[in-house]
Image: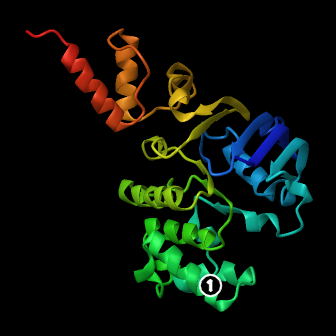
């Protein structure tokens, strides 16, 4: 698979700060990968997102070392506005992205800016409202709908422009569990049906883990751990030491392993955990 993102020896330090926000970052993201990015607050996750979509250094002052490539081209080499056609970003505060008076106008706005003709706009609007479950809200003002619906509108507005790389920066941080689940349901459909490269910065691991192909852990601006999702979560001592607390089933088997009551790889899904419990029960001596 071709590389969607390649970051080489990358360091970024904002002006008037004492330490770099990111330090000597090296990693690659193949096209079509679903990547989860986690880490404590202030670890550099948002700076990483801004570096990939060109907001850094485009709209921020600082000192840059190394390279950030998107589909083989340095982000600074893209013409103005060109990179934003390839990389779409959904932020944690959806209202910050709203510009229109109705949901429909919000979804159409970006497509019109890209110069799409009316038949293509109609086709994409039909597709994205079906994908995100927003058809019944098209005539509503985006400021008057629920938090979960606002986040789906922000996601749909970016998806309508069909970016090859989609970045979501803590998209569910202000949502209740039901709304959070609906956002991840949309991402699941997107992964199954589209093959976009998706990068999600998120604290809600119970929703992220089942979708992620690979994971990255950032800590104090450095990449502390990176790898395939199942292998990544075998490093529980490191993760917990960084303040990362996994979902209950994974944590349960971690505690079993610590007490020498379980051997082998930790299960990272509820289904795997259930199978492991069945296996352990079948091996338990009868009383």
Q: Residue at x 45, y 75 (%)?
A: 130
Whether residue 71 sits left or right of residue 104 in the image: it is right
Nearest to the observer: residue 106 or residue 74: 74
Picture layout, residue 183 above or below residue 247: below
State which quarter of the image contains the C terminus.
top left
> Is residue 17 visible to the viewer in this orientation of the structure?
no
Tell me which colouring the rendered structure shows. rainbow
Q: Residue at x 47, y 88 (%)?
A: 139
Quadrant hosting residue 97? bottom right
Residue tagged by mark 1? 121
Q: Residue at x 79, y 53 (%)?
A: 71
The picture places residue 115, in percent across and down from the top left corner, at 75, 84
Q: Residue at x 55, y 23 (%)?
A: 241
| Rendered location of residue 108, percent (x, y) | 62, 83
- x, y (%) of residue 76? 90, 56
Helix, strand or loop at disc 1? helix
Q: Name the foreground residue: 6 vs 184.
A: 6
Disc 1: CA contacts within 10 A as few (<14), some (14-19) or many (>=20): many
Q: Is residue 58 above or below residue 227?
A: below
Q: Say left or right for 101 vs 223.
A: left
Q: Residue extending furthest front? A: 1
In this rendering, the count of numbered labels is 1
Give coordinates of residue 135: x percent, y percent: 43, 80
Q: Quick check: 92 left or right of 252?
A: right
- 216 to the left or right of 187: right
On the question of residue 196 being in view, the answer is: yes
Q: Quadrant of residue 16?
A: top right
Outermost residue, left direction? Answer: 287
């Amino acid at each position: 698979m071709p590389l969607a993102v390649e970051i080489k020896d990358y360091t970024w330090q904002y002006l008037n700060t004492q330490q770099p926000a990111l330090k000597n970052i090296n990693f690659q993201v193949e096209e079509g990968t679903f990547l989860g990015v986690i880490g404590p607050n202030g670890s550099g996750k948002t700076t990483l997102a801004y570096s990939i979509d060109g907001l850094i250094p485009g709209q921020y002052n600082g000192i840059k070392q190394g390279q950030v490539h998107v589909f083989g081209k340095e982000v600074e080499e893209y013409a103005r506005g060109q990179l934003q056609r390839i990389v779409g970003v959904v932020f944690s505060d959806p209202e910050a992205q709203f510009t229109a008076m109705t949901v429909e106008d919000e979804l159409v706005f970006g497509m019109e800016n890209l110069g799409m003709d009316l038949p293509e706009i109609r086709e994409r609007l039909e597709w994205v409202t079906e994908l995100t479950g927003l058809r019944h809200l098209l005539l509503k003002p985006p400021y008057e709908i629920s938090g979960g619906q606002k986040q789906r509108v922000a996601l749909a507005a970016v998806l309508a422009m069909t970016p090859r790389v989609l970045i979501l920066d803590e998209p569910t941080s202000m949502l209740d569990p039901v709304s959070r689940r609906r956002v991840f349901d949309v991402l699941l459909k997107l992964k199954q049906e589209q093959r976009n490269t998706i990068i999600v910065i998120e604290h809600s691991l119970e929703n992220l883990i089942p979708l992620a192909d690979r994971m990255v852990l950032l800590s104090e601006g450095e990449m502390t751990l990176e790898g395939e999702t199942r292998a990544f979560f075998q490093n529980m001592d490191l993760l917990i030491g960084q303040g990362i607390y996994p979902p209950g089933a994974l944590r349960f088997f971690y505690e079993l392993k610590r007490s020498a009551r379980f051997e082998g790889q930790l299960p990272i899904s509820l289904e795997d955990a259930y199978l492991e419990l069945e296996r352990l029960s079948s091996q338990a001596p009868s009383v």
